[in-house]
Image (cartoon, rainbow, N blue to C red):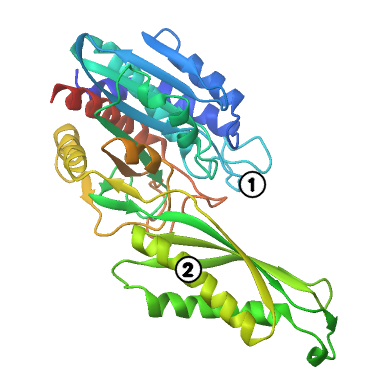
Amino acid sequence: MSFTESARDLRDELVRLRRSLHTTPEIGLALPRTQEKVLAALDGLPLEITTGKALSSITAVLRGGRPGPAVLLRGDMDALPVTERNDLPYRSQIDGQMHACGHDLHTTMLAGAAHLLSARRAELAGDVIFMFQPGEEGHEGAKHMIEEGVLDAAGARPVAAYGMHVVSSMLPPGLFASRPGPLMAAADVFEVTVKGRGGHGSSPHRALDPIQAGCEMVTSLQAMVTRTFDVFDPVVVTVGSFHGGTADNVIPDEARFEATVRTFSPGNRTLVKRRLVEVVEGVAAAHGLSVETSFGMGYPVTVNDPTETDFVSRTADELFGPGRYFVSPQPVMGSEDFSYVLEAVPGAFVFLGACPPDRDPATAPYNHSPEAQFDDSVLPDGAALYASLALSRLAS
């Protein structure tokens, strides 16, 4: 049987696991219930399993029937601090927590791949590392797992690594998409505290208003981006948090705001950090105030190896036929901590459309929305692609 046929036979089991994970989402690095469910799903398979020390990770190694190198497959397991607004029989049972980014599907597809490859263990010319990762949503789970040795779990550094991410809109269900080179942006955080002098709202000339100056900084940052950076090497700066003051007639002593900063090249990542500080310091000086700034480095750019990306494209065509793999014309501004793996190992990250058939991919709520929904029908194909990538890459 082909991987697609075998995966279809697993469909009911995969759907049960995914929906069980969806009902009890967990956030961050500590996912004890999720870990327990995944370990139960892997029970009985010929895997060498270790669990994390600083996080609820699972590393499972499948030894092939013939000697050879190792390949790594990754699925993230954590949820988001979002209250679900979907009326589903398997909706989240935990207020304020939801699998709004589809990581429950990633975990399930990876578990499915472990079943598929275990059944064809004798054909594997090498080993497969299954990386079940907590803490992708801002907690650097991949980095923690690397520090705990996931890349060396098979005894040698893998020759290739593959990850997958479902999307609840943009792509039709079942369509895979990726591109060589930069696929997802680096994501950093810029924090600013504007320090002024408080006073009465009726007499702003007797105070140094940090709110007015802070608002000018926000608009000046947008102008700086458009006048400093090439649109073909894009930079995005979005202020998502702004706080200042306690009453309508009180000018506060200070105001604070935070921005996410997205870049695709090392040069721009360095330059934008300097220009952000120059702009807010310049505006502050013009108004007689001062600022305190900090710049937190987040996830690096997710960069696909061109050879491995081409291999994913060919494998998808062979597995599903032409037309199921789409070359994305441009990268996306989201970020992903699989970037840490791809900094150490050549590989590729792939998107999979999982928009429900009763929704329009062009208008459906996107990942992270409390109304995001993902179609279970893609689970067998995701598991089959994971498995086929590992088997074919080792054979090559």
> Mark 2 touching mark 1, by CB under 8 A?
no
Residue 293 vs 360, above or below: the answer is: below
Residue 26 falls left or right of residue 328: right
Indicate the amino acid at tag 2.
Arg
Whole-number angstrom distance, CA of label 2 to CA of label 1: 37 Å
Label 2 crowd (10 A; few <14 / some 14-19 / many >=20)? few
Where does residue 257 sit, x and y in percent of width and height? 64, 67
Q: Is residue 365 visible?
A: no
Element carrying mark 1: loop
Horizontal side of residue 56 vs 110, given as left or right: right
Where's the C terminus, which quadrant?
Answer: top left
Using the image, tell me which numbered label, if any, was put on residue 83: 1
Residue drawn at x 41%, y 49% as measured from the top left: 300
Please give the residue where the numbered disc 2 appears in the rendered image: 274
Where residue 288 sits: x, y (%)?
69, 85
Question: Label 1 amino acid?
Answer: Thr
Mark 2 lies on a secondary structure that is helix
